[in-house]
Amino acid sequence: MNTYDVVVIGGGAAGLSAALVLSRARRTVLVVDAGAPRNAPAAHMHGYLSRDGLPPGELLAAGRDEVKGYGGEIVAGVVTGLSREGHGGFTAVLASGQRVSARRLLVTTGLRDELPDVPGLGDRWARDVLHCPYCHGHEVRDRRLGVLGGTPGAVRYAQIVRQWTHDLVYFTPPGILTGTERAEMTARAIGVVEGAVQELVVEDDRLRGVRMDDGHVVRRDALFVPPRFVPNNDLVVGLGCDVDPDGWITADRTGLTSVPGVWVAGNVVDPRAQVITAAGQGSAAAIALNADLVDDDVRSAVCDHNRPKETP
C-alpha cells in the first residue's frame, strides 16, 4: 500500500491549490479527483483575479499540470471510505479497490446544489438559470431578470440581484411577503408575481420566460435561483468530525476539523466560497498541514536521536 504525507480528496480549486503548496514544500501528495466539479456546466468563471472569464476546466487543467510539475500525483477516482490507522495516520479506499495510506488528510469534496422541483430548471442550470449574482450578474446586466423566491433569505437575495438590472421580477408563493418586504421591493421597483411556477419557457435553446400555474407567461431572459446547499461530507462525518446544527463540518480558520490530522477546505465547509476563495482556503490549509507535519517530524527526530545507540 502506497503511503503519502497528504492525501487530498477532491481535485477542484481548493484541493489543487493545497496540493501545489504541499508539493512545493517537498511533501509526497496524492490528489484523488472524481472529475465532477460543481461549476462544470458554467462556460466561464468570474471574479478570479487574472483569470476572469476563463473556462473552469482550463483552470483545473493548468492546476493539475502545475501540481504534477512539482512531483504531486493525481489519480482519477472516487474515495469510498476513510479509516484511522493505529499509528495516527489514515487509510483511504478507492472505488477501484486501491488502498492508500496518509499521514494527513485534506478533504475538498465540495457541495451539491438542490434545486426546486420546477420543470426545466436543471437543464438550464449555469446557463440562464443562475445562483450567484457576483459570478454571473455582470453577464446578464440590464436584461429582464427574475428571482425564484419563497425560501429563507430569498427576499434579501432579490435585493442584491436588483443591483444588476432595472427590470427584476420576484416570483413567490402567495401570502409569504411581509408588509415591510413588499414596501422595500416597491421602493426599488422590483415586480412581484405571486403564485406557483409551473415551468420554464425555453425557445431556440434560450430561456424566454416563466409560466405560472394560471397559464400566463412572464417574459424573462435569465432567472436567479437560491438553491439549497448540501455538503458532500459523508467521508469526514464517517471519521467522526463534528458538525454544526445545520450539518456543516466545524473547523478552525485553517480548516482543521475536530479530528486531529483531518483538514477541510472549499465548499465542503464554506457554502459561500467562490473559486478564488476556495483556492485561498486550500493554500491556508496546506500551510497549516505542513506545519503540523513538521512538528511530527521534529518529534520523530528527537525520539530517534535520544534512542540508545547499540555498542559494537
Image (cartoon, grey):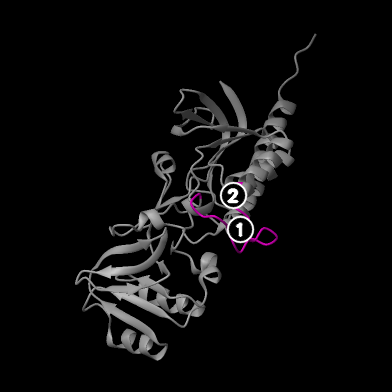
Q: Which of 234 and 214 is in front in this view?
A: 214
Any part of residue 68 in sight: yes
Using a 10 Å C-alpha cutoff, classify the residue at mark 2 as few (fewer than 14 neighbours), some (14 to 19) or many (20 or more).
many
Name, please, the residue furthest toward the top: 312
SS of the residue at dot 1?
Answer: helix
User: Could you tell me if residue 294 is visible in this image?
Assistant: no
Image check: 149 left or right of 161? left
Q: Residue 61 in magenta?
A: no
The foreground one among 126 and 152 is: 126
The amino acid type found where label 1 is placed reads Ile
Identify which residue, 86 or 38, lies in the foreground: 38
The answer to whether 53 is drawn above or below residue 102 in the figure is below
- Picture coordinates of residue 127, whole percent (x, y): 46, 59
Q: Do the residues labelled 2 and 1 touch (CB within 8 Å)?
A: yes
First in residue order: circle 2 vs circle 1: 2
Left or right placement of residue 54 versus residue 136 in this view:
right
Q: What stretch is highlighted in magenta?
A: 40-57
Residue to which mark 2 is pinned: 13
Q: Label 2 to label 1, Cα distance in Å?
A: 8 Å
Query: Can you give x and y, in whole percent of width and height, for residue 252 in the image?
Result: 53, 55
Q: Is mark 2 on a helix, strand or loop?
A: helix
Name the spot of residue 207 as percent of width and height, x first.
40, 64
Q: Is residue 165 left or right of residue 173?
A: right
Q: Which residue position holds label 1?
A: 276
Residue 244 percent across, percent down from the top left: 39, 56
User: Magenta span: helix, strand or loop, mainly?
Assistant: loop
Extreme residue in the right direction: 312
